[in-house]
Amino acid sequence: MYPKNLLYAYALIGICALPACHKGTSYGEGMVRLHVTGTWEGQPFQASQEHHDVLNHRVFVDGLKLYLSDVQLKGPSGQEDLLEVGLFNLTVGEGVSLVKVPAGTYGSLLFGLGVRPDLNMSDPSQYAAGHPLSVSNGTYWTWASGYRFVMFDGRFDTDPNGTGTVLPTFSIHSGKNDCYTTAERLAPSPIHVEPGDTTDVYLNFAVDRFFYTQSDTIDISTDNQSHGENLTLALRFTDCFVQSTTLH
Amino acid sequence: MPSVREDNPLTTASVRLGKSLFFEKGLSRTGTLSCSGCHFSDRAFSDTLPRSFGVNGEQGMRNAPSLANVAYHPALFRDGGVPTLELQVLAPIHDHLEMDHDINFAAAALREQEPFATLSQEAYGRPLDAYVITRAIANYERTLLSGWSRYDRFVHLGEPALTEQELRGMDLFHSSTAGCASCHSGQDLSDHAFYNIGQYLDYADNGRERITQDPADDGKFKVPTLRNIALTAPYMHDGTMATLGEVIDHFASGGLPHPNKSPLLVPFTLSPTERADLIAFLTALTDERSIDQVP
């Protein structure tokens, strides 16, 4: 029933994003290519591969989609919009968005994990298929009239030496405005955007860090379901998601 | 006042389109289920099953409520999680337990068909799409009005439309003994608020808490209208009470001692005659003409 070729096209590029409005071309502008990536212990994240989490559980991540809102580069002269809202499917690889910004030097990236509250309250039927907020993306909680911000799904095994792959599942879907979280990540070195050139900026999610922070460890064998009814767990995971991010 | 939106004027064309879509099975993934498949017009637009079956053969989460007077509801669904009729339309179409489809794909498949193609242009000046579908069905639902029962004729027109037994039941309904009217009040015989009525000690479905995340809302559900209540069995959010007698017996018991149970629920005793009187009154709340205004 679904136009699979269309879905596949989105899957290939791994992104469905709505770039923020930006100014017209001028001599003092360059391009920024924003990459949203995933890693597991420093290696490129691949879906459905066997990993071990911080508690040595076997973990297979089968689905990882997330929204980012209000992504901005921050420099001495202010903030420049890169993306108003985007849906990134890291299950199929990195997501990329190309945006024009004033040339200059920037020191950090601002972003919101999730869908900004005013957009979260919008009517998804006004967005055509292909738009990041389209109901066709399967990210909208119709019962709560809001979007799922992060969809993190997979399987786990408490036996670190297990060999089976048909396993209990975890399904962590965060959403609702309480879970919308903004953050700023400093660039390890200044980001120079030269006029007429393209600069690559990488926002990375360390998926192995999705299960712990410095102050919290989530046992996926017991805390493995969140679909809007378990806000406490959704907020714990949200904290992990945000703290896992780095800019490079 | 009913919730007519400025961006969705209640026009004849939009309502006619909405009705056509309400009865259109092409809104489901398999082409086998329409809105009317769980909201029967001869049952005040409710279902006869405790929980309706979707296109995948699985049962929905809750009992399908009557759609009568939904235009007056400040929030939709039994937990009040959806603020508008337009947004509500998305839920059954996309719910895997119901129609399990994608509204954009459904619109694409129906766009060239009549009467959708013509009515969509006439009503909204654009081809059929998700925007049109949600607005048209919402407008049709706004026209599902209940207010022509014998009770209405008695109260509003002063006609001797109720029997002696029904009048005794009405007095009981409004009495402090049964206390029904504490929550089943107003023109819709519902205050549209959310209460825990002590149906369970441990609710499998947390109701309003799922929306508010407030444990004090565990087990709370919206007060249903009592209009056409004799047609809308089975009862409660999960459809587990088959008859009005069972419902009355539950309230007479005072309910189970759930921490969130409303203090309005206190045990009371009815004689068999009083119980029958109350049921007779509730039966008099059935409309004498169709609540569907669209020919």
Image (spheres, coloured by chain):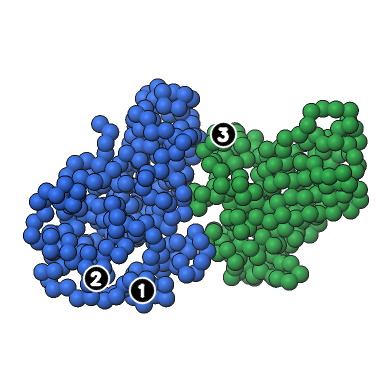
Chain colours: A green, B blue
Q: Position of residue B93 (x, y in %)?
A: 44, 43
Q: Amino acid at mark 1?
A: Pro
Query: Quick one: A233 or B32, which is closer to the camera?
Result: A233
Q: Is A186 left or right of B88, judged from the image as shown?
A: right
Place residue B114 in its image quadrant: top left
Q: Is B137 left or right of A20, judged from the image as shown?
A: left
> Label 2 is found on which chain of the structure?
B
> Label 1 is found on which chain of the structure?
B
The answer to which of marks 1 and 2 sits earlier in the sequence is: 2
Q: Position of residue B179 (x, y in %)?
A: 26, 68
User: SS at mark 3?
Assistant: loop
Read off the residue under disc 2.
B176
> Label 3 is found on which chain of the structure?
A
In the image, residue A87 sits, relative to residue B13, either above or below, namely below
Marks 3 and 2 sit apart, C-alpha to C-alpha, by 54 Å
Query: Quick one: B259 or A13, which is closer to the camera?
Result: B259
In the image, residue A180 sits, relative to residue A212, either above or below, namely above
The answer, for residue A103, to whether it is visible in the render is yes
Q: Residue at x 26, y 39 (%)?
A: B292
Q: Amino acid at mark 3?
A: Ala
Marks 3 and 1 sit apart, C-alpha to C-alpha, by 48 Å
Instruction: Indicate which disc residue B15 carries.
Output: none
- Foreground mark, 3 or 1? 1
Mark 2: few/some/many CA within 10 Å (<14, 14-19, 20+): few
In the image, residue A28 sits, relative to residue B100, either above or below, namely above
Read off the residue under disc 1.
B263
Q: Amino acid at mark 2?
A: Ser
